[in-house]
């Protein structure tokens, strides 16, 4: 049996795998938040940053494939561990959450599933730029801006228009709350899986998990909320937003264009 089989076929190996892939995804979440918070600066800041990442295809695709592998392994080890636990304890506990890891660990699978669904939506919304899912009727691939004398995708404008839609903002906020619940327990469990649980370290680890997951919750929620409330880039959004009539009635838009000539 090779090392990969040995890791995969032991529950301890799967716990390590889940902890390590979780740690990698956590590092991504911090980096992604720092990148996204640039939306609070001038448009050139986040547009230049996004353009820089896209101009390094090897780095970009390496990170994308690494992330995909981490998400896949994290989900697969979570599901198989849950199956192993269920097989080892065919009769459910009489009192839910009274033993073992407690109530918080029961959130992990359902919150994880909704977060996975959010990621699929989020990729369609802001990476693949599927016009049908953004709720604005606008095609984000047409949004371009000038940055350092180059025409680049207008990620700043896309976020402003994208978070002008109430249900989209609500879905993002719900996903961030579930992500907070998942991280609050998951981060502490990660250290426990790596063998760092004793009476001195455990309270500190729990405090660290709480503080970091609250900071991520506030950071991620601040973006859609600030944009929806027009605290960020309201004039810019006004300039690039298509009038509703032009989206819903192409004939009206054509008449307007003729009149303009
Ligand atoms: C309010 C919260 C968030 C905002 C505003 C946001 C914004 C963005 C934007 C603008 C992009 C596209 C970047 C570009 O085209 O250059 C993106 C991509 C992405 N986001 Fe988020 N994001 C948020 C939360 C999250 C969360 C919570 C996760 C993971 C759980 C996540 C995972 C990703 C991934 C995997 C990509 C694809 C990166 C790539 O292009 O390879 N995002 N996000």
Image: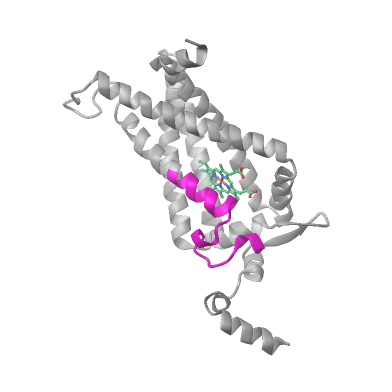
Q: Is residue 139 left or right of residue 218?
A: right
The residue at the far top in this view is: 1
Q: Nearer the viewer, residue 163 or 57?
A: 57
- Residue at position x 46%, y 15% from top? 5
Residue 253 appears at what percent x and percent y? 61, 81
Q: Judge whether 191 appears above or below 79 on screen.
A: above
Q: Judge whether 57 appears above or below 7 on screen.
A: below
- Residue at position x 16%, y 26% from top? 94
Residue 83 appears at what percent x and percent y? 31, 26
Residue 190 appears at what percent x and percent y? 46, 23
- For the record, the magenta segment spans 117-142
Q: Quadrant of residue 32?
A: top right
Please tell me whether the stretch drawn in magenta is mainly helix, strand or loop: helix
Q: Is residue 164 left or right of residue 110?
A: right
Residue 55 appears at what percent x and percent y? 75, 44
- Residue at position x 64%, y 52% from top? 39
- The question of residue 121 being in magenta is answered with yes
The residue at the far front in this view is: 1
The residue at the far left in this view is: 94
Q: Quadrant of residue 197?
A: top left
């Amino acid at each position: 049996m090779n090392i990969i089989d040995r890791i995969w076929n032991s529950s301890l190996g799967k716990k390590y795998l889940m902890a390590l892939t979780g740690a990698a995804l956590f590092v991504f979440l911090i980096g992604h938040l720092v990148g996204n918070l640039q939306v609070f600066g001038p448009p050139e800041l986040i547009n230049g940053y996004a353009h820089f990442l896209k101009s390094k295809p090897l780095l970009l695709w390496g990170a994308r494939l690494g992330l995909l592998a981490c998400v896949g392994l994290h989900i697969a080890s979570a599901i198989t561990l849950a199956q192993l636990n269920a097989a080892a304890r065919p009769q459910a506990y009489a009192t839910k959450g009274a033993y073992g890891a407690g109530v918080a660990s029961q959130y992990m699978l359902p919150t994880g599933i909704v977060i996975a669904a959010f990621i699929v939506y989020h990729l369609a919304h802001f990476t693949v730029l599927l016009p049908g899912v953004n709720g604005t009727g606008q095609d984000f691939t047409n949004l371009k801006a000038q940055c350092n004398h180059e025409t680049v995708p207008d990620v700043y404008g896309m976020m402003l228009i994208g978070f002008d839609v109430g249900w989209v903002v609500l879905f993002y906020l719900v996903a961030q709350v579930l992500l907070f619940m998942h991280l609050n327990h998951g981060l502490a469990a990660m250290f426990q899986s790596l063998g760092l649980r004793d009476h001195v370290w455990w309270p500190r680890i729990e405090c660290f998990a709480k503080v970091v997951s609250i900071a991520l919750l506030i950071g991620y929620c601040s973006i859609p909320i600030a944009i929806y409330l027009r605290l960020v880039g309201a004039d810019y959004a006004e300039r690039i937003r298509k009038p509703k009539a032009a989206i819903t009635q192409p004939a009206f838009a054509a008449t307007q264009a003729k009149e303009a000539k």
